[in-house]
Image (cartoon, rainbow, N blue to C red):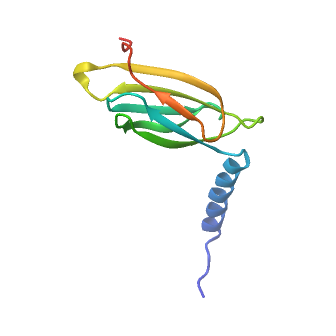
Amino acid sequence: MRAFNPATIALACLFSCVGGAADLGGGLTITVRNDTTDNLILTIYDRNTRPPQKVLSGTVVLGSASIPVSISADSSGHGHLSWTAITVDPDMRMCGHSDKPHLNDGDTVHVQANGDCAG
């Protein structure tokens, strides 16, 4: 019979409890759609967490592709995210960003990088 280390059990419980706490808020799945033909480098923040938490960081999303992300719900059941995007092509660099509150499970957020990048 194998003896369990109390520290290992405590650590497993901690991870289980942290994961369970995120589920209590009623996580939402949001589809993020690249509305351009350009490949974008995308970063997304969950604004319902304090402090806001990155749920996607510097991820390349191909032109016209969609990806699902999970964010937390507030007390009224809505999600809130913000995003920044930059084109992959360094010779034709374009940027974009937005803030999207009041999201429902299954909503789609459209992203694009069609503006100038701040110097």
Q: Where is residue 55 drawn, in percent x and y?
A: 52, 39
- Quadrant hosting residue 91: top left
Q: Where is residue 14 drawn, in percent x and y?
A: 66, 57
Please give left or right for residue 60 compared with residue 80 in the image.
left
Residue at 65% x, 69% y: name it: 6
Residue at 38% x, 37% y: name it: 61
Residue at the limit of the structure toward the right, as seen here: 75
Image position of 29 with respect to 87: above or below: below
Q: Nearer the viewer, residue 61 or 50?
A: 61
Residue at 62% x, 61% y: name it: 11
Q: Nearer the viewer, residue 115 or 66?
A: 66
Residue at 46% x, 34% y: name it: 33
- The N terminus lies in which quarter of the figure? bottom right
- The C terminus lies in which quarter of the figure? top left
Please give left or right for residue 51 compared with residue 86 in the image.
right
Image position of 43 with respect to 117: above or below: below
Q: Where is residue 69 drawn, in percent x and y?
A: 53, 42
- Quadrant hosting residue 45: top right
- Quadrant hosting residue 63: top left
Tally the numbered discs: 0
